Amino acid sequence: MGDDVGVQPQDVAAMRRQYLAVGLDESDLAGEPMDQFDHWFADAVKAGLDEPNAMVVTTSGPDGQPSARTVLLKGYDRRGFVFYTNYSSRKGAEIDANPRVALLFPWHPLSRQVIVTGRAERVGRDETAAYFRSRPHGSQLGAWASEQSRPVASRAELEQRYADLAARYPEGEGVPVPPFWGGYRIAPLAVEFWQGRDNRMHDRLRYQAGPEGWRVERLCP
């Protein structure tokens, strides 16, 4: 190989902007991280962010190689954060082998991030079924049609699977919940609230779980 590293189409090193002057102080925080998340999530919704419930889920394989993907948050409460997936997918297999998971909510227009580390567990089948039945009919069929993360010969093959299912379960007819599909709840062990500030002097406040409850620590930016 030669020394040519290719053409860089944009000067990414020069891309920067100043963040908000309004900061995040310890006195502003709720006593529980999920209550604080609820406040910030409401701000993201009110601000009209595109898919404010989009989050990056990071897992790791048995060789320690991390993998990340964006999924949609579908519920949260004091117990944690819930999303749904095919249990046979890459993330499902990795979570089952190693339930330690990280989440990232990238709310860039608000100069905010929320970073969660915790442990994942499957939600109950009743909870999964209730959510599955709330999904659009086409999304229910898609859960059956896609062997998520597995190779498929062509787009045509994938669409044929969907068409066969649509003929078997037409609109208005109940679609059974796939046994290989369901929810995970991430119970948080640490939740960091990151607020962008001028001159890269960002505010980072992290809730850390302990034997006597949650404690808050400030991190250097």
Image (cartoon, rainbow, N blue to C red):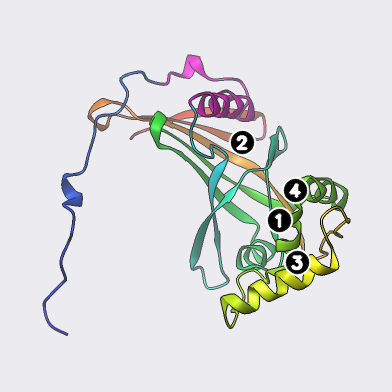
| Label 2 environment density (alpha carbons within 10 Å; few <14, some 14–19, many ≥20) | some
Answer above or below: position of 136 versus 65: above
User: Which residue is tagged 3?
Assistant: 144
Q: Amino acid at mark 3?
A: Trp
Residue kind at label 1, given as amino acid type: Ser
Find out whether residue 46 is within the magenta segment: yes
Q: Tags 3 and 2 in contact by the CB under 8 Å rule?
A: no
Rendered view: 211 above or below 89: above
**Magenta-colored span:** 24-47
Location of mark 4 (residue): 135
- Is the residue 133 above or below the residue 20 in the image? below
Q: Quadrant of the N terminus?
A: bottom left
* Relative image position of residue 27 (x, y in whole percent): 49, 14
In the rendered structure, are the residues bearing label 4 and label 1 in contact, judged by CB atoms less than 8 Å apart? yes
Q: Secondary structure at mark 3?
A: helix
Residue 174 image position (x, y, % from top left): 88, 56
Q: Main secondary structure of the magenta part?
A: helix
Q: Which residue is mark 1?
A: 139
Residue 150 appears left or right of 18: right
User: In this orientation, which residue lies closer to the viewer: 214 or 71?
Assistant: 71
Q: Callout 4: 10 Å neighbours few (<14), some, many (20+)?
A: few
Percent across and percent down for residue 135 are 75, 48
Give whichever of discs 2 and 1 has the lower sequence position.
1
Q: CA distance from mark 4 to mark 3?
A: 13 Å
Location of mark 2 (residue): 209
Q: Secondary structure at mark 1?
A: helix
Front-most of 217 and 118?
Answer: 118
Q: Amino acid at mark 2?
A: Ala
Viewer-nearest residue: 158 or 56: 158
SS of the residue at dot 4? loop
Of the numbered discs 4 and 3, the one sitting upstream in the chain is: 4
